[in-house]
Amino acid sequence: MKNLGVPYAIGYIIAGIIILPLLIFAVDKILFKGNNAEKYIYQYLDNSEELKIKIDLDAKTNYTIEDLKSTAEGKDFTFGHEIYTAFLSRKGGKIYIDKIGFYSEEYRKFFTIRLTNMGDNYYLRNVIKNKNVIITVNKDDMSNPLYGTKQNPIPIFKVVGDGKPITINSTDKNGLTT
């Protein structure tokens, strides 16, 4: 009787080294084409403007039962946390997003700041509360009547201090405040 183990082993090695990666590459190219965001992102960012604004996180009044329920579920407009799962990524595949929303009386629009994997920036809402800052937003979003509502707030790309930088104090491993 012939030993058929060697030809089968060679076939498995060839399939694992050559055919399987080519198959994965083909499936990736066919099914996961991605999007054309890179073509438009720079145009979108170049169409941005800086606004001087006071962030008033206490402006929300007239709470409804739905507002209180969504706050308890972490879905409140003003504050919230979202967790997404991203496979094949660092930090266990979790993406943490902290949301800070507020209403501007001056512009009569809702705005939102979204922080991804915030780390020390988790306390940013305490630092910027009732402060004058300079925010960067898209001009088209500001003029679009569909944006700026509570359900569809205007995204803020950058927040900097007005006159002095925004600093977040922290404590180092020796107990010293920086």
Image (spheres, grey):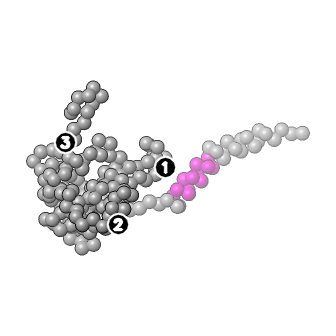
Locate residue 99, reporting x and y percent: 31, 55
Check disc 3 and give the amino acid type: Thr
Locate residue 8, reporting x and y percent: 75, 43
Residue placed at 18% from the left, 56% from the top? 55
**Looking at this rendering, what residue extends furthest in the right direction?**
1
**Camera-side mark, 3 or 2:** 2
- Span shown in magenta: 18-30
Look at the numbered disc 3 and give the secondary structure of its residue.
loop
Assess whether mark 2 and mark 3 are in contact (beta carbons under 8 angstroms).
Answer: no
Check disc 1 and give the amino acid type: Phe
Look at the numbered disc 1 and give the secondary structure of its residue.
loop
Look at the numbered disc 2 and give the secondary structure of its residue.
helix
The secondary structure that dominates the magenta segment is helix
154 or 128, which lies in front?
128
Residue 27 appears in which quarter of the rendering? bottom right
**Camera-side mark, 1 or 3:** 3
The label shown at residue 167 is 3
Question: Which residue lies under the disc numbered 1?
Answer: 87
